[in-house]
Image: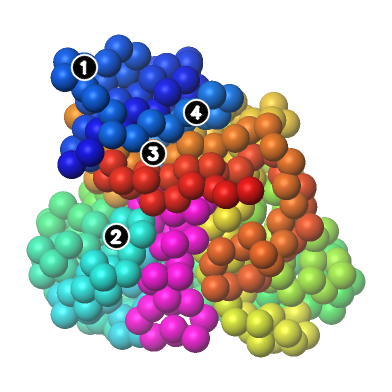
């Protein structure tokens, strides 16, 4: 394989305490040296990263690729191309595809499609219960052997707590992490906005914070009893951040994430019935938004993900409550996260960790660092360039974004996966 030199870039890798200008040397798909060239290194290709920031490839904990089952919305090929153009080198796909990822044959199907079409690495979560029906446990060990990096019931509730406990115990026995999106279905059913004054004024059915915290408290109790490693995804409220903080202080083996849009938007953004802001969990109060930011800043929340959900245009063209929730979010993941550093809300090292080594650790994969010997998955971006988001630069098949028209200063210039340059921005 070829040798690649990335010269004069500003390297940031919190794991290795890198935050300085240096050269990066890649050989046969792996990082072989930093600063000084190794012996017998003759670069076949050189990237001049002067004025650019070089970080490990972004690891996205939750991205729905829509294939198999909803190819009219997006495909593995379209979304992994979009991911690569956004500096995302690894994506994790939840199990709520069609068919559901509840048996090895579905894992093999997605792996086959990924091998022929993917531009970024694609990982999968297996279903906790067959068909995500919350009743019968899936063949977790078979899913693990097939390559699933964890287990989840996605947004489908497991109503029977005994089934929930048995599922967590089985996962713990297999050494698998359970990925939980806390939602009490009875409290959230039919809702589309945060339960508060804005939803009341707009005449929209609200989803109370308790829909999240009741489910979170229940899950935490079962996690404590079974000893399973658990990850709580897409939290939306100050109360949830406080509960995670207490649980970590009590020694529970848990991690948590937040989606990038929850760090920049709140309930006021739905005031014009903007269906692009229809997400689940809903955009909550400004106080919740600030608590989520502080949660990332102090390490209570470990990671920032895209929660990418591409939709066809019809899905968002209806009255707010009748539209499908979700944001096409790959292209804005890095710019939104770095904006928090530019605004001096969260330091840049914490931001980079929350998108690289932290999610990689949660998934149990060897990625997210610039360690010597690591696979050369790398994102190179410009922090000082002005551009505006519009449909032409949303490379996902889904164009549903509430950030349309926003101005940004961060843009991905190059993406490298396994030592191969797979994206370079052309002006």
Q: Which residue is mark 3?
A: 378
Residue at the spot 13% in from the left edge and 67% down from the top edge: 146
Which of the two marks, 4 or 3, is nearer to us in this view? Answer: 4
Sequence-first tag of 4 and 3: 4
The magenta-colored residue range is 62-91
Horizontally, residue 70 falls left or right of residue 366, namely right
Earlier along the polypeptide chain: callout 1 or callout 4?
1
Question: Mark 4–mark 3 contact, CB under 8 Å?
Answer: no
When the figure is inspected, residue 207 is found, relative to residue 176, above or below; the finding is below
Q: Badge 2 is on which residue? A: 123
Display colour scheme: rainbow
Element type where label 4 sits in the image: loop
Q: Locate residue 187: give its quadrant.
A: bottom right
Residue neighbourhood size for the residue with mark 4, other residues' Cα within 10 Å, grouped as few (<14), some (14–19), many (≥20): many
Q: Secondary structure at mark 1?
A: loop
Which residue bears the numbered disc 1? 38
Residue in the foreground of this view, choosing between 59 and 215: 59
């Amino acid at each position: 394989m070829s040798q690649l030199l990335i010269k004069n870039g500003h390297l940031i890798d919190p794991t290795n305490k890198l935050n300085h200008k240096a050269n990066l040397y890649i050989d046969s798909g792996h990082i072989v040296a930093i600063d000084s060239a190794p012996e017998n290194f003759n670069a076949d290709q050189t990237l001049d990263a002067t004025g650019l920031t070089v970080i490990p490839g972004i690891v996205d904990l939750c991205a729905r690729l829509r294939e198999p089952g909803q190819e009219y919305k997006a495909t593995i090929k379209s979304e992994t191309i979009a991911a690569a153009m956004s500096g995302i080198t690894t994506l994790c796909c939840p199990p709520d595809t069609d068919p559901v990822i509840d048996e090895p044959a579905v894992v093999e199907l997605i792996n086959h499609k990924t091998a022929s079409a993917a531009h970024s690495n694609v990982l999968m979560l297996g279903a906790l219960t067959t068909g995500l029906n919350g009743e019968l446990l899936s063949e977790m060990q078979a899913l693990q052997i097939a390559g699933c990096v964890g287990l989840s019931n996605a947004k489908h509730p497991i109503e029977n707590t005994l089934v929930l406990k048995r599922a967590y115990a089985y996962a713990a026995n297999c050494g698998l992490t359970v990925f939980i999106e806390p939602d009490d279905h009875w409290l959230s059913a039919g809702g589309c906005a945060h339960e508060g004054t804005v939803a009341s004024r707009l005449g929209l059915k609200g989803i109370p914070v308790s829909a999240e915290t009741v489910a979170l408290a229940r899950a935490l109790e079962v996690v404590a009893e079974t000893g399973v490693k658990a990850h709580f995804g897409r939290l939306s409220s100050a109360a949830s951040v406080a509960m995670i903080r207490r649980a970590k202080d009590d020694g529970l083996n848990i991690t948590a994430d937040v989606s990038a849009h929850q760090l920049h938007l709140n309930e006021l953004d739905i005031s014009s019935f903007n269906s692009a802001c229809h997400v689940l969990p809903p955009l909550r109060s400004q106080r919740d938004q600030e608590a989520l930011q502080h949660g990332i800043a102090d390490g209570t929340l470990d990671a920032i993900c895209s929660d990418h959900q591409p939709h066809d245009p019809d899905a968002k063209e209806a009255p707010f409550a009748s539209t499908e929730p979700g944001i096409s979010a790959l292209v804005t993941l890095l710019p939104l996260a770095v904006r928090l550093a530019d605004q001096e809300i969260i330091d840049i090292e914490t931001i980079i960790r929350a998108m690289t080594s932290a999610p990689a650790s949660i998934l149990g994969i060897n990625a997210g660092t610039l360690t010597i010997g690591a696979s050369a998955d790398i994102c190179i971006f410009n922090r000082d360039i002005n551009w505006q988001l519009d449909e032409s630069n949303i490379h996902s098949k889904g164009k549903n974004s509430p950030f349309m028209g926003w101005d940004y200063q961060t843009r991905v210039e190059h993406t490298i996966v396994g030592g191969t340059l797979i994206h370079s921005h052309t002006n």
